[in-house]
Amino acid sequence: MAQHTGRHFLQIPGPTNVPDQVLRAMAAPTIDHRGPEFAALTREILEAVRPVFGTTGPVVIYPSSGTGAWEAALVNTLSPGDRVLAFETGHFATLWREMATRLGLEVDFVPGDWRHGVDPAVVGQRLAADPAIKAVCVVHNETSTGVASRIGEVRHAMDEAGHSALLLVDTISSLGSIDYRHDEWRVDVTISCSQKGLMLPPGLGFNAVSEKALRAAETARLPRSYWDWKPILTANQNGAFPYTPSTNLLYGLREALRMLYEEGLDAVYARHARHAEATRAAVRGWGLEVLCLDEREHSGSLTAVLVPEGHDADKIRELILDRFDMSLGSGLGKLQGRVFRIGHLGHFNDLSLAGTLSGVQMGLELAGVPIDPNGVTAALRVLGAA
Ligand code: PLP
């Protein structure tokens, strides 16, 4: 392993780089989670977290990873044997489907090629054909592929079909990076977690919950205890949780939200879209292929890059880590060895992207991948023009 100096480049699509302000905010004494200081913090955070989801309704916060927040969304709203519509957009959609099946749900899993998002027309067709479907599960941003589904259009298709299914959306790698509107799109449960666009370490899971989802929870019969919204929402009214919350991560969340709102959410989304565009310019400039095939579906938070036949993406990543001290995302599931993923989300700026892309370009050249060395220049042109 080469000797490294300076900062590591953490360019996986989450966990992301944690800003110094957030690290400092968390480096505080742990306080009594049943005392008045913590109650005030909880109340402040439960309000402050809503705008990033685009909601004025309740957001449940768990001391969990995103997988826990997935489970919470299912067990609070559904009953054994309920039919659920889901889409094979990639590795994470596949894992969520497996969880739903293990929990006793009947999943209608629409096959996909891992290069496209959810087709709203197919949502409409499937719902029209099956009035018994209780929920539509969509991963907004497939972190394994860099493809973002169009949730507003999915909502529209559900409305056109006149179907009453719940809409459950995973925003784990889009929240705070890609435009998202829980209330406007009438999403019933928005699932997220802390370690991506929110720029925090792993350890917080979220469910933003609609009125309709709260009503569904009254009759849902999947077993639930730890994930049950009701005791949490009840305790939250007094600024408390029914169990020990992640106290110091909540300090960090308060600071991270401050940073996002200070920049302005629209500016945050535009910054991510611009960095994604510059990244695609680099990839195409190298003569390589972006995995996402639909121009309307490019992710703002990461780009998955296909490596040419005869090259192993994992070997290229290993070389880049060893030589340049940069971590890139691996190919997941059936994409293992075929793609690497560049994370460009969270605490990130033009020069972080320039450094990231330079490391990728040098790594590709060292690995003997035949590329055009003008990729980085193409990206810099996009950054410079803005
Ligand atoms: N869903 C998506 C889209 C993800 O990217 C991830 C993790 O990267 C998960 C779910 C699972 O979240 P966690 O690993 O925090 O449990």
Image (spheres, rainbow, N blue to C red):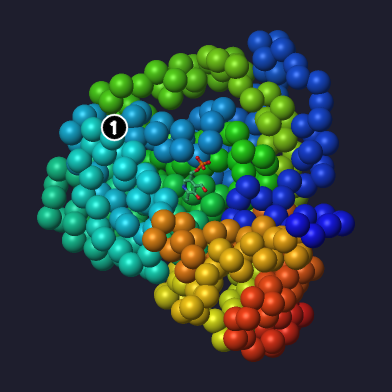
**Of all residues shown, which one is farthest toward the front?**
1
Give the left or right position of residue 280, taking residue 79 as reference. Answer: right
Ligand 1 within 8 Å of the CB at mark 1:
no
Q: Specify the quadrant that holds the C terminus.
A: bottom right
Does residue 55 show up? no
Q: Nearer the viewer, residue 90 or 253?
A: 90
Counting from the top left corner in percent of width and height, residue 336 is at 46, 61
Counting from the top left corner in percent of width and height, residue 183 is at 45, 46
Residue to which mark 1 is pinned: 103
Does residue 315 show up? yes
Q: Nearer the viewer, residue 32 or 14?
A: 14
Q: Residue at x 57, y 27 (%)?
A: 63
How many labels sit on residues? 1
Counting from the top left corner in percent of width and height, residue 48 is at 64, 36
Element at badge 1? Answer: loop
Give the left or right position of residue 229, taking residue 110 as reference. Answer: right
Q: Residue at x 73, y 84 (%)?
A: 377
**Of all residues shown, which one is farthest toward the right?**
5
> Which quadrant holds residue 228?
top left
Is the residue 73 above or below the residue 328 in the image?
above
Is the residue 36 above or below the residue 220 in the image?
above
Counting from the top left corner in percent of width and height, residue 369 is at 60, 81
Q: Specify the quadrant that holds the N terminus.
A: bottom right
Instruction: Indicate the amino acid at tag 1.
Output: Leu
> Which quadrant holds residue 29?
top right
Q: Residue at x 52, y 70 (%)?
A: 312
Give the left or right position of residue 177, taking residue 181 as reference. Answer: right
Is the residue 166 above or below the residue 203 in the image?
below
Q: Residue at x 46, y 38 (%)?
A: 67
Q: Nearer the viewer, residue 19 or 176?
A: 19
How packed is label 1: few (under 14 Cα within 10 Å), some, or many (20 or more)? some
